[in-house]
Image (cartoon, rainbow, N blue to C red):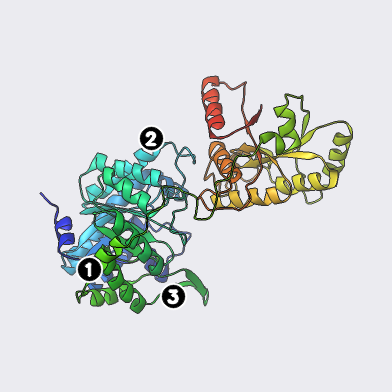
Amino acid sequence: MSHPFLKRLEQGVVLADGAMGTLLYERGITFDRSFDLLNLQEPALVQSIHRDYIRAGAELIETNTFGANRIRLAAHGEVQDARRVNRAGAQLARNAREEVGEAVFVAGAIGPLGKPVAPLGTIPRDEALEVYVEQVEGLVEGGVDVLIIETQTDLEEMKLAVQAVRQVTDLPLIAEMTFAEDERTLYGAYPEDLARAAQSLGVNVLGANCSVGPQKLLEIVQRLSRRTKLPISVMPNAGLPRFVNGRFAYLASPDYFADYAVRFRAAGASLIGGCCGTTPAHVRRMRAALAHPGAGAAEAVAADRATAPPSPPPHAAPAGVEEPASSDPASRSLLARKLANREFVVSVEVDPPRGARPKKMIEGAQFLKASGVDVINVADSPMARVRMSSLALASMITQQVGVETILHFTCRDRNLMGIQSDLMGAHALGIRNILALTGDPPRAGDYPNATAVFDVDSVGLIRVLKQLNAGTDLAGNSIGEPTRFMIGCAVNPASEDIQTELERFQKKIEAGAEFTMT
């Protein structure tokens, strides 16, 4: 028997609500607070926003649970409350529905975990599944009608989230990914990849949300409509945020959104709403615009499908960009050549100074070079104690002393964007050898309360390095000339759990490690 939500989609476009976070910010909640925990801390505020969206004409409202998983909540000390936060979020949306007296659908919102999932990231897949299941159970216990997985950038993580939903319930499921200007996700997935995956996942509606604004998502909707018969959803941002008069503001007007709501419908969208920067005013104007059936909408979709160009294959290189051939490892650096020729290599580790004067380290490097050392490896804030940038010292040694370095590069202090930027910068400065390390946790050092990033671990970092050596960033965007890094990893032969250590070493080799240091 068909679910009421799916029956309603068959009858015409369903209008969803807009942003929750934007309104919370406008009403005095700062970004350093957990918006999800407001379900417990300030329930009246959350319920009032749901109420405003219903009165503006939304037929589907999303729960305030985008980040209500234990991994994201851990940053606010609320790991154990994930189920409770989700249950409360669902109940608040239901309460608002009863208060207004409109027959709207309550969709349980499920966002990304906040940290990449293995094999790229540090979250094991079984743990990720468990975290998602916990969130879904809380939402179902709270009484949601529908579930929506949104703002996903990693197709593999989205599949885990879908799997979690289907382990718990057969409620209708909406799955949305977010696409950048080049119409790919951060991890390089095309709309066609999403359409292909959805066919076997048990998804009822698929689409896109967030991104850079309505214009770009219109193109995504058109591409999806050519590749799937499933209902399509679209919930764009109100453009990109600007800092105006001391506050963040989104500049896409309600009238602009109303115009695009009609275009979305003509392109084949069945569920239309808003994401960051949208308000009840945007929903109200979209409701008015969609109240008048668009003449020729079905014909427009059919014509668009008929003239569609072939879709790119999954994760293909952008048009005009050749797949670079892998370079000969021996040509990358002195270290690479010596290892390839099975020659003995002498390396000495140098720690950066605690201050901003590296004179002693430079003089030490000069002495080591004169003594016949082949390469100097430069540590990255060992034991999580503050020191000069290892990249800065390695660059100075390379340029001022003329001896090759191995840069210790950790994941502790950089997100994925910072990692890739710093690696390309290191390459531009002449660094060719990288020792990929996870990094010592802050609690081991001078600043135990400092925030550790760890978007990826050493295995994920090795994958990033291998991708850069192939001429693309992690999202598949061309970086022009490929980097020529010699990729190293660490292994501990004295580990108390040698079997686990060897298994992890094997993963590093499979990811692309070319030499190891013990």
- Is residue 71 in sight in this rendering? yes
Above-or-below relation of 88 to 296:
above
Q: Quadrant of residue 180?
A: bottom left
Mark 2 or mark 3, earlier in chain? 2
**Front residue of this view, candidates 413 and 328:** 328
Tag 1–tag 2 contact (CB < 8 Å)? no
- Residue 16 in view, yes or no: no
**10 Å crowding of disc 2: few (<14), some (14-19), many (20+):** few
Q: Is residue 31 left or right of residue 350?
A: left
Q: Quadrant of the C terminus?
A: top right
Give the amino acid at mark 3. Leu
Q: Residue at x 43, y 59 (%)?
A: 183
Q: Secondary structure at mark 2?
A: helix
Number of marks = 3
Q: Which mark is residue 126?
A: 2
Q: Is residue 168 depicted above or below 264 in this figure?
A: above
N-term mark: 3 or 1: 3
Q: Secondary structure at mark 3?
A: loop
Say if mark 2 contacts mark 3, CB within 8 Å: no
Q: Is residue 444 left or right of residue 90?
A: right
Name the element at disc 1. Answer: helix
Q: Is 37 rendered above or below residue 282? A: above
Nearer the camera: disc 1 or disc 2: 1
Q: In this orientation, which residue lies closer to the viewer: 89 or 357?
A: 357
The crowding category of the residue bearing disc 3, from other C-alpha atoms within 10 Å (few below 14, some 14 to 19, many at least 20), is some
**Percent x, y of residue 388:** 73, 48
Mark 3 lies on residue: 251
* Residue 317 - label: none
1 or 2: tag closer to the N-terminus: 2
Q: Which residue is mark 1?
A: 299
